[in-house]
Image (cartoon, rainbow, N blue to C red):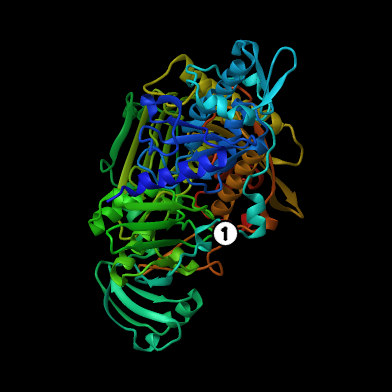
Amino acid sequence: MQNIQSKSRRDFLKSASAASGGLILGFSWLGTQAFGAKVIDPSAVAHEFNAYLSISPDGKITIYSPNPEIGQGIKTAFPLIVAEELDVDFDQVTVLQANLSDKYDRQLTGGSGAIRHSWDRLREAGATARELMKEAAAQKWNTSSANLTTAKGMVISPDGKKLSYGDLVETAKGLNTPTNVKLKDPKDFKLIGGWHKGVDNPKVLKGERLFGIDLKKEGMFNAQIQRPPAFGLKLKSFDASEALKMPGIVEVVSFDNKVAIVGNSTWEIMQARKKVKIDWEKDKDLESSEDHDRIFKTYLDKPDNGEVRRKDGDIEKAFAEAAKVVTADYQCPFLPHSPMEPMNFFAHVKENGTIELAGPTQTPGRAVASISKLLDVPADKISVELTKMGGGFGRRLDDGYAVEAAHLSSIIKKPVKVTWTKEDDISGGYYRPAVRYRFRAALDKDGNITGFHLKGVGLNAGNCTRQDNFPAGAIDNLLVESVNYESPITTGPWRAPITNFLAYAEQAFLDEVAEAAKKDPVQLRLELFERAKNNPVGEISYDIDRFVETIKLAAEKASWGKKKNISQGFSAYFSHNSYVAQVAEVKKVKGQPVLSKVIAATDCGIVINQSGAQNQIYGAITDGLGHAMFGKLSFKNGEPEQKNYDSYRIIRMNEIPEIEAHFVNNGKSPTGLGEPAIPPTGGAIANAFAAATGKRLYSQPFNLEDDQVESYL
């Protein structure tokens, strides 16, 4: 039977060939084993290639992009990079979303790594095509390509003659592809670093079908699934007799501790779902939020029960000889991801032994692997059509919702799309882990930190610390311990995993240490970086100079410590290979503290698209602020107490302060930007409120901890 992924690749090549008049460049982007570009025959499967660039006779350029678009802007940034090196106007380049192919080495969206991974590859693709066009023009003009230049999709001779790339397609087909092409000097960039609108914006505004929720397939049925209402329950029995009498309902089946209602339309299913009678029984011990408090206290208070993640120097001696010891605990709750687009996925398990999948997923390869194992179908018989995602924040890293769609299709022998309600999603499990941290710092008589101890306890969090992050490397005596408690409550990565809360706790604690040491918070951090640079201790995972430059830029732009009648809070963090420093500002309004502004400085290397980068910063800070202030998911007998936005509080538009974004311009290769601005946000806000009120915040959400913070609302 034909390999589905190879067929998908061949279909693309035929389509691109028809559009381009036949000129297609193939590339292989497999890390260090990359092959150079080559003009390829579109009728061939071209197994050795996994990325393609086509040029049509009318000058239009198309690239085939593997990474799923989740709102991070890669569908705009990828063609922008190619257009820059190819020397064409941005509107001449479009990008087609690649379906899943085994030829890609990183066909996923997560970890803020898409641009970092593809930066050099995309530049090489554009530069190779540019040099090929020059070679084609040189042959036509009987001259050397070294004498030619390019601009706006044209090859230009010294005497002013011009040929468009489209005019050169036929000649280029017969040429050998250039190798070892020279990339542009960043100072010569014309497109990169400018302001560009998202390429999908018009389609989104017009309501065109881009997202998984819009997807419709011929013969497709719809389904919703009733899952256990609480953790620790299992299905005992169900009665669907009344539901099956309702219009549009096809069948009701149970599988994998769930009950699926299948019908013609989502509305009909939602009505019938209310008529299905389900009995659940206890399978495991159920937990409440009170249990979590007890677990945290037990494990934090109990010595020698944590896994040592890092130990530098003699931590016991440092605390024994300390002139002063500062101690603080910080706690965060479980949080749902709650993307705007509900979870949904289409699956068709066919009689011929193949499986067709379609929908919004950050990890299509993981979904295929799980479905292959579950249904005993070879992975190369499973295809995945990737749709645009209406948010994910880590939720769509999970493959469970895709797996259950395929499982259901295999049972009912029909193509089906499973759609979750918002209540399903918020109460359905896969949350940010709840964590509590305990920090201790030993100070000498001069206020210098001589010892630093972090112990974290997470509920299904794995390693809830990042042991090599700052201030590790700057303190002679340091101990980092982690405890993972296995809870029935299921968890998964949440935007900027672990660091989304850990950064707040670390940065709030450093401010408390600065206060005890009678030092300015920014100066305390700069002193620690100086120590790390001059006398490093152990492994250092961050670039000290880049970190310091980012901190200084934020302090400068915020006029740190110089504003009257404004209380400022500082925070800085390194994650996903990027550095972000923030200053939050609180002012008194009618005697009450109000968050008025957040100033952010970011070092993410070269900024590809200023518009996209600014929006990433604004969105991340808003997300970080909203969840630090309001987000909370609590449990009673294993059941979430918040199930929709009437009880689960999210930030509102009128609560978003002014946000100011600045970028370090250092010309370095770009790094991540989708997540790094979230971690420092909570710390900057907490420190600003502490400066304004004299009271420190130790638990999120902040609005439940302090009535003065409540006045922010």
Image location (x, y in percent) of residue 197: 68, 43
Query: Which quarter of the rendered picture does the C terminus lie within?
Result: bottom right
Image location (x, y in percent) of residue 596: 71, 47
The quadrant holding residue 354 is bottom left
Q: Nearer the viewer, residue 151 or 69?
A: 151
**Residue 208 as seen in the image, left or right of residue 398:** right
Image vertical order of residue 288 relative to residue 38, above or below: below
**Residue 255 as seen in the image, left or right of residue 620:** left
- Pointer 1: residues within 10 angstroms few (<14), some, or many (20+)? some
Q: Is residue 562 visible?
A: yes
**Residue 345 as seen in the image, left or right of residue 650:** left
Please identify the residue farthest to the left as the structure is shown: 376
Image location (x, y in percent) of residue 660: 69, 39
Image vertical order of residue 655 relative to residue 667, above or below: below
Q: Residue at x 36, y 25 (%)?
A: 33
Q: Is residue 526 visible?
A: no
Q: Residue at x 34, y 78 (%)?
A: 252
Residue at the spot of label 1: 209
Q: Nearer the viewer, residue 56 or 192?
A: 56
Image location (x, y in percent) of residue 206: 66, 58
Q: Nearer the viewer, residue 370 or 455?
A: 370
Secondary element under disc 1, as helix, strand or loop, is loop
Question: Which amino acid type corresponds to the residue marked 1 in the rendered image?
Answer: Arg
How many numbered dots are placed on residues in this image? 1
Image vertical order of residue 705 relative to residue 44, above or below: below
